[in-house]
Structure formats: structure tokens, C-alpha cells
Image (cartoon, helix red, strand yellow):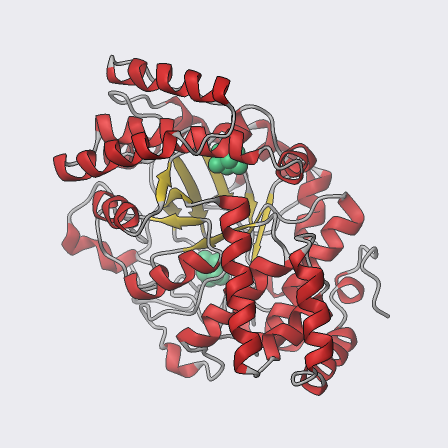
Amino acid sequence: MYNPKSMKAEEFISDEEIKDTLAYAQANKNNIELIDSILEKAKLRKGLTHREALVLLDCDIEEKNEEIYALAKQIKKDFYGNRIVMFAPLYLSNYCVNGCVYCPYHIGNKNIARKKLTQEEIRKEVIALQDMGHKRLALETGEDPINNPIEYVLESIKTIYSIKHKNGAIRRVNVNIAATTVENYRKLKEAGIGTYILFQETYHKESYEKLHPTGPKHNYAYHTEAMDRAMEGGIDDVGCGVLFGLEMYRYELAGLLMHAEHLEAVHGVGPHTISVPRIRKANDIDPEAFDNSIDDDIFAKIVAVIRIAVPYTGMIISTRETKECREKVLNLGVSQISGGSKTSVGGYAEDEEDEEDSSQFEVEDRRTLDQVVNWLMKLGHIPSFCTACYREGRTGDRFMALCKSGQIQNCCHPNALITLKEYLEDYATQETKDIGNKIIIDELKNIPREKIREIVVKNLEKIENGERDFRF
Ligand code: SF4
Ligand code: SF4
């Protein structure tokens, strides 16, 4: 029985409700009256239910689809302006006891080099990341209670926060580790993590069990209920996602939005971010083996519908996607991207040749962070290295309150300019610096409150004179 308030995975992600939703969406995909009423509701910017979102996803009336894309772009603009938050993944260890059939780290893969970074190696990785200009990381590690116990993750977080190389600092560490206990989530919270990220991979239970044939991850309920345990452990920013290409994308989107509705219904706050990875080629993995892969057009539609359905939730895209694809979805709703990423363990500090051996997937976008920053600015975006909310304690419902009050423009926008300025001063090439400084001057006028604008101008001067780390 479907119940968004239930704490049981199979009740808040009800297979029956998803199937009914998909049938409803198919039956109404040409229902102009209904589609118009959903679009009217979406214009209020308070989001949509999973049923409404699925009708928009299935809609195949060209003119209405244009309206959907236009609305997604408008919502993106209203909530996130032209800012794009930058981050990088950091792989700590690829030891894993699970048998996930789509991931090269699965326990049965004997071809891949297994590596686990020591604290000294983590230092080197972090220095390399700081020297690129990164301030925000997403920690990744396989599940292995012997090689990667929670103590190892906690010690690594401590190491990362402690490193201050030149003007560099990692100011926010998000963590993407396997589903764990309330007690461990509490420890992660105490260690000062930003968002806890866990991809569901697929919401379809039967497929989930087949795709995860062995290891603790096989347990669908334990995995699906992880966000509730994380919230119980005090982590109020959680990041959801599915791996598109594993199950039917319509099923996945319905499941993903039902998960968001569940978190909102039970904890009063939905997911902080949603990630939209697609399956990629990797060691021992052939994406062709998964017959549910989605093309770029459907991918763009998914991004647009998510933007409309959950306007307050950040959306993340990684270097799994090509430059062209990233360019398209940035306007439709993506608010965070990675840049200059290495998906191997120790990839930032080591030589290029060694890199592929331990990587989780092949990177499509291989540009450096400076090239990505430069490209974003030429497209009219403002790359932001902001980590202010987490450091000001604006997490969970406090963060949502800020979003809903419309004050985000007085916060995110100045923070983006200040952190971009730091990047330009410390890490950018001359060309990037010139473009960036011009953008900063142009964008000052878009800070609504004069008082804040004055403070930003002063802070920009201070940054030029060597001071760092200002925020609103
Ligand atoms: S997806 Fe995660 S849990 Fe599964 S094999 Fe890969 S690293 Fe391990
Ligand atoms: S002010 Fe908060 S919401 Fe805005 S970019 Fe910075 S961390 Fe994100």
C-alpha cells in the first residue's frame, strides 16, 4: 500500500503506485487540458507531484514540450541565476565487497588495480585539488568493512579539512559512501560533512536485486531507507540519484520523485541535491549490456522535468557527460558540475598513464578545471566555489527557508562573485582571469541590495590584497 509517510521502503516507493503513475501518464500524454493545468501549477514554483511530473515527461506534443523547456529554463534562472557551483570527486579506495554488475569495483573484477589511499596519499591528492582551485569535494569509496571502515573515512575527512596549502582549503566535504547505520551517520555529521550522497541506482526492486546479486548492498530496503537513517543521525542535507540506463527511465523518475516526497513528508525537508548520472563504459563494464540506456534528448527532458518538479533541489552532473551534453542541460536546470575530475584512486597526484587502471568510469569531459571555468564564463555562467551555507549552519530546513524566502539572490550571487575572484587571483590562467574580472564587474549590478553590493566591492579589493574566505 502506497504511503509517503511510511518508513518502509516498499510502502514509500510503492511498485503499484509507480505502475499506476506510468499508466496515468501514458493515458494523458496528449491531454492538453491536463498538461496546461500542470504547467500552470508548475509556474507557481512550488513543485509538482510525481504523477504530474510523469505526465510532463511523457507529453509528446511538441508545442507543450517547448513550454516545458522554457519553464525549466525560467525556474533555473529565477532560483539559481547564472551560477554553477563547482566540485570534484575524490576517490579514497576502490576495495568493495559488493557485486554491483554495472560497476568495475565489483568484488568479482580481478582485472582492476585495487588501491586505498594512505593519509599521506590523501594529503597529496588534496594539495593537487587545492592547486587546481577546488574548495568542495565529494568523497567516494567502495563498501568494505575491513579496508574502508567508518574510522578510515572519518580520519580521511579530518585530514582533508586540515590541509591548507598556499591559499587553498577544502571547505566542504560531501560524502558518498554505502548505506550505513544511524550511529555511523551521526559520526559523519560530527566530522563536519556537507551532504550525504547515496544513489539508489534503481528504484525497481526486482532489478535492484538482480543488479546487486551479492554483498550488503543486495538488501533493497536497507539501501532505500538509508536517507531516513542519515536524517535520524542528524545529517539534514542528503543527495539522491539514480543511475540512468539500468531500469526504465520513467520508472526511475517516478521513484526518485516519490523518494523526495517521502523525505519531505517525514522529515520536513526534501533532498538537497539530485544527481543524474548515466551508465558509462569502464573496466569490465559495457554499457551496451544494459538495454535501458537513454539518449541525449530524453536525458534533457528528464533534467527539465526534475527542475520543474523540485525547484529547490540542486541538480548535479558529472564529467561522465560530454561537453556538448553538459552545455545543453546547464540551461535546463543543472546547478552543480564537476570539473577537472579524476575517477581513479590517487588520480590527481599520479601520472596520467597509471590513472585508468583503478577508475570507476571513463570520463567524457577531460578538460582542466581552468578550461571548464573559462568555458562556463564564455557561455554566460558564473562558476561559483561557494560553500557558505554549510559553514554558516544553513543546512536542511534552514537552507530551504532561505531558498523559499527568495533571499538566495542576496547570498549565492555575492558569494559566487567573491569565490570566483579568489579562484581568479590564485589559480586562473591570464585569459580566464581577464574574462572573469570583467564578468564580476558586470555582475555587481545584479546584487539586489545596495548594502551587500558595497560589502562585496570591499571584499573584492581585500582579495586582491591577499585576504581570503569572505562569505554571506
Ligand atoms: S557501485 Fe559502489 S558498492 Fe557497487 S561495486 Fe561499485 S563501489 Fe562497490
Ligand atoms: S550561498 Fe549556500 S546555496 Fe548559495 S551557492 Fe553558497 S552554499 Fe550554495
Residue 82 appears in which quarter of the rendering? top left
> As rendered, which of 102 and 169 lies closer to the eye?
169
**How many tags in the picture?**
0
Give the residue at x 61% y 40%: 237
Q: Is residue 244 left or right of residue 32?
A: left
Q: Position of residue 408 (x, y in %)?
A: 56, 35
Q: Position of residue 2 (x, y in %)?
A: 83, 68
Lateral position of residue 34 relative to residue 113, left or right: right
Position of residue 301 measured from the top left corner of the image (x, y, whole percent) = 51, 71
- In the image, taking residue 254 as reference, residue 290 lies left or right, namely left
Name above or below for residue 324 compared with residue 450: below
**Percent from the top left, x then y, of residue 171?**
43, 28
139 is higher (above) or lower (below) than 334: above
Pick the residue in front: 253 or 457: 457
**Pick the front one: 287 or 56:** 56
**Position of 343 compared to 83: left or right?**
left
Residue 242 appears in the rendering: no
Is residue 181 visible to the viewer in this orientation of the structure?
A: yes
Q: Residue at x 43, y 75 (%)?
A: 297
For the point 26% across and 14% down, which residue is it? 466
Q: Residue furthest right?
A: 1
Among the 4 quarters of the image, the one containing residue 395:
top right
Q: Quadrant of the N terminus?
A: bottom right
